[in-house]
Amino acid sequence: MVIRPPDPAEQASALTVIAAAFASAASPDSEPAEVELTRRLLVGPDVVAGLTLVAVRPDSDIVGVVVGTRARVGDVDAIGLGPLAVRPDAQSAGVGSALVHAVVTATDALGYPVAALLGDPAYYSRFGFSAAADLGVVAPDPRWGEHFQARRLSAWTETAVGTFRYAAPFTQM
C-alpha cells in the first residue's frame, strides 16, 4: 500500500471511498454529510498541502483517505483532521492506521503544534490522541465530550490552548 497526496483527478474516487465508509450513517436515499463536507473542503482554501492523503493498494483504486485542514486553537494555527475514511472491504487491514500515522507525522513535520479530530477515543488513543479538554483545547460543540480529541505535537507551546475552530466548511454543514 502507498500513502500519498491525491492527484486532482482522483477526487471522485476519494469521495466514493468516503461515501462507502459513512454509508451506514446516512439514510439509503441520501449521501453521507461527510461527502459534501469533503467536497467543500477540497475546493476551498483551507486544505493544507501534504495533509490530505490517500491510501492506494497496488492494482487497486483508492482504499482510504484523510483530509487535513487549517484550524485555530485560541490564537494559534492548528490542524483539523477528518474525514478519515476507509473503504469497507479494506477496513481492519491497517489502512486507517497507516493514514493516521502518515498525517500526524506530516502535520508534525510542518510545525503545527496540535491536531484535533472528532472520533472514537478507543481507536484514536493508540495514535496519541486524548480528550482535547485534558490538553486545554475546547471543543467547538460541548456535546462532543471525549469524542473531540487532540494531540500535542513537537511545536506545542502553552499558548496552543483555547477554543478549537475548524475551517469554515465544518461550521456550514
Image: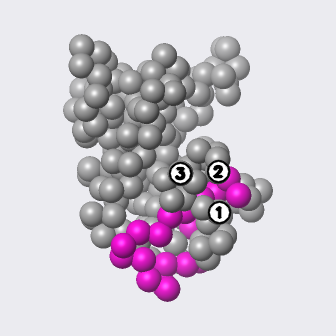
Please, is residue 60 above or below residue 150 in the view?
A: above
- Residue 159 within the segment the image draws in magenta: yes
Dot 2: element = helix
Please, is residue 1 above or below residue 135 in the view?
A: above
Q: Residues within 10 Å of mark 2 (few under 14, many from 20)?
A: some
Range of the magenta residues?
Answer: 146-164
Q: Nearer the viewer, mark 2 or mark 3?
A: 3
User: x%, y% of residue 170?
Assistant: 55, 50
Q: CA separation, marks 2 and 3?
A: 9 Å
**Relative side of 58 to 44, left or right:** left
Please, is residue 106 above or below residue 154 in the view?
A: above
Mark found first going from the N terminus, 2 or 3 = 2
User: x%, y% of residue 54?
Assistant: 33, 34
Residue ranking furthest to the right: 143
Mark 3 residue type:
Arg
Dot 1: element = strand
Q: Camera-side residue: 172 or 115?
A: 115
Colour scheme shown: one colour
Please, is residue 39 above or below residue 91 in the view?
A: below
Quarter of image, res 9: top left
Q: Name the residue tied to disc 1.
A: 131
Quadrant showing the N terminus: top left
